Amino acid sequence: MKAKFLLDENMPFALIDFLKDHGFAAIHLKKIGKHGIKKR
């Protein structure tokens, strides 16, 4: 079973490639149309 990572908006997109190159599944919140807490 391989680990899956969901990266938040503070993580660089380059980390997705790094994780995938090392056999992990990874996706960024922005790629799925999500975002974190809205600032006031």
Image (cartoon, rainbow, N blue to C red):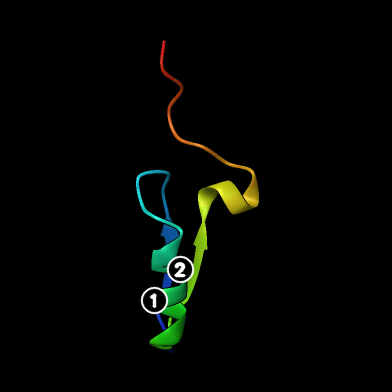
Instruction: Please give the residue where the numbered disc 1 appears in the rendered image.
Output: 18
* Residue at the extreme front: 14
Label 2 CA crowd tier, 10 Å (few <14, some 14–19, many 20+): some
Above or below residue 12? Residue 10 is: above
Give the structural element (helix, strand or loop) at label 2. Answer: helix
Look at 46% across and 80% down and name the residue there.
Answer: 20
Amino acid type at mark 2:
Ile
Name the disc covering residue 36, or none: none
Look at 56% across and 47% down and name the residue there.
Answer: 30
Give the quarter of the figure containing the N terminus: bottom left
Do callouts 2 and 1 mark residues in contact (Cβ within 8 Å)? yes
Give the structural element (helix, strand or loop) at label 1. Answer: helix
* Residue at the extreme top: 40
Above or below residue 32? Residue 3 is: below
Above or below residue 28? Residue 19 is: below
Give the quarter of the figure containing the C terminus: top left
Name the disc covering residue 16, or none: 2
Amino acid type at mark 1:
Phe
The image shows residue 8 at horizontal and vertical percentages of 41, 48
The image shows residue 14 at horizontal and vertical percentages of 42, 64
Look at 38% across and 87% down and name the residue there.
Answer: 22
Label 1 CA crowd tier, 10 Å (few <14, some 14–19, many 20+): few
The image shows residue 5 at horizontal and vertical percentages of 42, 66
Q: Locate residue 15: give its quadrant.
A: bottom left
Total of numbered circles in the picture? 2
Q: Locate residue 9: give its quadrant.
A: top left
- Give the alpha-carbon distance from disc 2 to disc 1, as whole Å: 5 Å
* Residue at the extreme right: 33
Look at 46% across and 22% down and name the residue there.
Answer: 38
